[in-house]
């Protein structure tokens, strides 16, 4: 039986699931940032200012990219590079404030210029946060192992499947890139628990406590619920 601590954990990680509401919000977001997107495309800056802006944006984003995007960016003309970085920069400003509906159109315009993992990660996560899990998954699954965001993307995919109670698929993605902060382990422990795989659940909960986790009480609860099924002295 799930206890209070596990229920609290699930409430904390739960994402909304309302694709129609998400669709309306994104449409409104497109209207709100449409003028901004056009201004970015036809920004009337002097050549000197444009080069300085481009240099600054390149330094900001190329440092964050792994090899999934650097070569593609270098192959773009300067005008397109400037447009791409400007769109991503404006999208990031909205994203960091939790204004996902406004961020998505900017990221999607940037994706039309250059389709790389970091863009798909941000679009997918934004759609998920708004409640459109199908679209979120679609974009997150396009984040490849060469992307700096691959680890977090696979974790987010696993979390979505956990929320949808597809525990076997959730375990697959959560274990692709297990984190060392304990959060991935406690989510995996919960999935094994729901599948009645008590030894695996116990072991993952033990790892979560070893690494440290914000869901410490939930990890303890799982250990206490499963240890009667496990030969503790033999396993640990």
Image (cartoon, grey):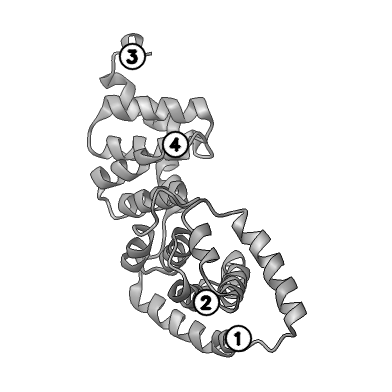
Q: CA distance from mark 3 to mark 1?
A: 59 Å
Question: Which of the two residues, 145 or 71, is positioned nearer the viewer here?
Answer: 71
Q: Residue at x 54, y 31 (%)?
A: 212
Q: Which of 54/97 is in front?
A: 54
Q: Are marks 2 and 3 in contact (CB under 8 Å)?
A: no
Query: Based on the displayed image, in which of its 4 quarters is residue 19 positioned?
Result: bottom left
Q: Earlier in the sequence, mark 2 or mark 1?
A: 1
First reached walking from the N terminus: tag 1 or tag 4: 1
Q: For residue 206, what is the image quadrant?
A: top left
Residue 159 image point, x, y percent: 38, 50
Q: Position of residue 45 (x, y in %)?
A: 72, 85
Are discs 2 and 1 less than 8 Å apart at CB?
A: yes
Label 2 sits on residue: 106
User: Which part of the image, by quadrant, shows the C terminus?
Assistant: top left
Q: Residues within 10 Å of mark 4 (few under 14, many from 20)?
A: many
First in sequence, mark 4 or 2: give its number: 2
- Residue displayed at 30% across by 41% down: 171
Q: Nearer the viewer, residue 56 or 176?
A: 56
């Amino acid at each position: 039986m799930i206890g209070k601590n596990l229920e609290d954990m699930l409430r904390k990680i739960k994402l909304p699931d309302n694709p129609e509401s998400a669709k309306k919000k994104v449409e409104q977001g497109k209207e709100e940032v449409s003028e901004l997107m056009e201004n970015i495309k036809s920004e009337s800056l002097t050549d000197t200012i444009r080069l300085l802006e481009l240099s600054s944006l390149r330094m900001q984003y190329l440092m964050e990219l792994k090899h999934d995007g650097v070569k593609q960016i270098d192959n773009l003309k300067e005008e397109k590079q400037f447009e791409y970085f400007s769109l991503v920069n404006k999208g990031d400003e909205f994203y960091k404030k939790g204004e996902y509906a406004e961020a998505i159109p900017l990221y999607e315009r940037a994706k039309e210029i250059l389709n790389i993992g970091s863009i798909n990660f941000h679009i997918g996560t934004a759609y998920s946060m708004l409640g459109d899990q199908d679209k979120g998954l679609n974009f997150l699954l396009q984040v490849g192992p060469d992307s700096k965001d691959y680890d977090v993307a696979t974790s987010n995919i696993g979390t979505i499947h956990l929320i949808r109670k597809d525990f076997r698929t959730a375990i697959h993605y959560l274990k692709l890139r297990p984190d060392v902060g304990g959060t991935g382990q406690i989510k995996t422990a919960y999935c094994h628990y729901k599948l009645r795989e008590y030894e695996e659940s116990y072991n993952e909960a033990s790892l979560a406590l070893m690494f440290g986790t914000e869901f410490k009480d939930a990890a303890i609860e799982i250990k206490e619920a499963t240890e009667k099924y496990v030969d503790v002295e033999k396993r640990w």
